[in-house]
Each structure stands twice: as structure tokens, then as C-alpha cells.
């Protein structure tokens, strides 16, 4: 009888340890799943950010860059209605021929619709424009942004932070 109790005790202890090991294994598997999901989320966010920037990284023409920048800043307050688009088209036509203006406006509308954060557009395109434009052309670009915001259905107020950021990224001194 004592032998039977000892065997049952050993079997009970083994079952208890087996259960505890199984529970620890399940907990470790859950932790690994959580870590995998977090790593996947980080990787997907990085890919989304890269994909969001891809319309901007493809720009290699200052006219298209200016059109995209203006369109993005103006569309921040809502969709671009036909009269606003006409104003943007008129502003861009001052620096390009009709064919180039059409191409720039079409690409700018598409790129602005793909990227919903205007600061990303400013941060990506303003240094590109700073390298390719002289000081007077950069001043003209700022005036073009203001004219595009003032024309159209109703006058838009572009956020002061956006204009300050644009001025800073274009290489102007900001107070």
C-alpha cells in the first residue's frame, strides 16, 4: 500500500509538472505571437510610409514639384473644386507651357490625393525645389501658393505653420 501511494504521488507530481510546463509553453507562444504582431505592425507602418512617399520620390521636375506642393497645401482644407483647379492651373501656366501645365496638374492632383499629410509633402519637395530654384524663383513660389489659396470658390487660409515650414525648408530665414 505505501508503494502504491508513492507511485500515485510520483504520477500526481509528474502530472502537475506536465500541466505547469504546458501552461508555460502556451504563455511563451502567446508572447511570441504578440511580439510577431508588433513586429509585423511596425514593418507594415514602415511600408505604408514608404508607399505614401513614393509619388513624391518620383518627381524630378520643378514644375511638377511646385504644382504638387501648391495642390497639396490648397487641398488640405478640402477637395479641389473646378474653380480652385482653374486658379492652380493659371498659376502653374505662368511657369510652364500648356502641355507641361496639364501634366503637372494631373500628377499633382493624384499625388496630393495619395498623401494626406501636407507636412510630408513640404518636407520632401521644398528641399528639392530649394536646390533647383534661385531666391527670386522661391519667392515667386511662395506668392503662387498665396494666389492659389486666395482664388477659387472661397478664400482659403493656409495655416501659418505650413507657410513657416515651407519658408524654412525653402531656405528663407524664419523669425
Image (cartoon, rainbow, N blue to C red):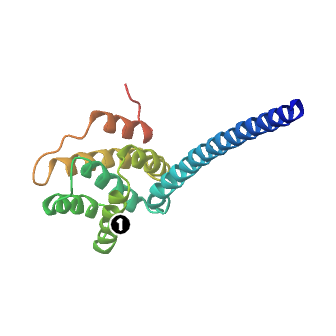
Taking depth in this image into account, of 121 and 131 the one nearest to the observer is: 121
Furthest toward the left, the residue is 153
Quadrant, the C terminus: top left
Residue 164, position as x, y percentages in the image:
35, 34
Taking depth in this image into account, of 111 and 11 the one nearest to the observer is: 11
Q: Quadrant of residue 103?
A: bottom left
Taking depth in this image into account, of 31 and 129 the one nearest to the observer is: 31
Up the image or down, 64 lies above or below 24; here it is below
Residue 156, position as x, y percentages in the image:
17, 44
Q: Residue at position x 22%, y 47% from top?
A: 77
Q: Quadrant of residue 135?
A: top left
Q: Residue at position x 48%, y 62% from top?
A: 60
Q: Residue at position x 16%, y 60% from top?
A: 81
Residue 94 horizontal side relative to residue 65, left or right: left
Q: Quadrant of residue 84?
A: bottom left
Furthest toward the top, the residue is 175
SS at mark 1?
helix
Residue 45 horizontal side relative to residue 101, left or right: right
Up the image or down, 27 lies above or below 64; here it is above
Up the image or down, 45 lies above or below 110; here it is above
Label 1 crowd bin: few (<14), some (14–19), many (20+), radius 10 Å: some
Count of numbered badges drawn on the protein: 1
Residue 9, position as x, y percentages in the image:
81, 32
Residue 94, position as x, y percentages in the image:
26, 61
Furthest toward the front, the residue is 1
Quadrant, the N terminus: top right
Furthest toward the bottom, the residue is 99
Up the image or down, 23 lies above or below 145; here it is above
Taking depth in this image into account, of 4 and 165 the one nearest to the observer is: 4
Which residue in the protein does label 1 denote?
107
Amino acid at each position: 500500500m505505501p508503494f502504491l501511494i508513492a507511485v500515485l504521488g510520483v504520477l500526481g507530481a509528474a502530472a502537475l509538472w506536465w500541466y505547469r510546463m504546458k501552461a508555460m509553453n502556451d504563455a511563451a507562444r502567446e508572447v511570441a505571437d504578440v511580439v510577431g504582431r508588433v513586429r509585423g505592425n511596425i514593418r507594415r507602418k514602415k511600408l505604408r510610409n514608404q508607399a505614401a512617399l513614393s509619388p513624391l520620390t518620383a518627381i524630378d521636375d520643378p514644375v511638377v514639384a511646385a504644382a504638387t506642393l501648391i495642390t497639396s497645401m490648397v487641398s488640405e482644407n478640402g477637395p479641389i473644386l473646378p474653380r480652385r483647379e482653374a486658379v492652380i492651373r493659371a498659376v502653374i501656366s505662368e511657369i510652364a507651357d500648356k502641355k507641361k501645365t496639364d501634366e503637372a496638374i494631373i500628377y499633382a492632383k493624384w499625388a496630393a490625393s495619395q498623401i494626406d499629410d501636407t507636412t510630408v509633402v513640404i518636407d520632401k519637395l521644398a528641399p528639392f525645389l530649394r536646390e533647383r530654384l534661385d531666391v527670386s524663383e522661391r519667392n515667386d513660389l511662395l506668392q503662387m501658393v498665396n494666389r492659389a489659396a486666395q482664388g477659387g470658390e472661397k478664400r482659403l487660409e493656409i495655416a501659418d505653420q505650413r507657410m513657416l515650414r515651407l519658408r524654412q525648408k525653402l531656405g528663407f530665414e524664419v523669425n
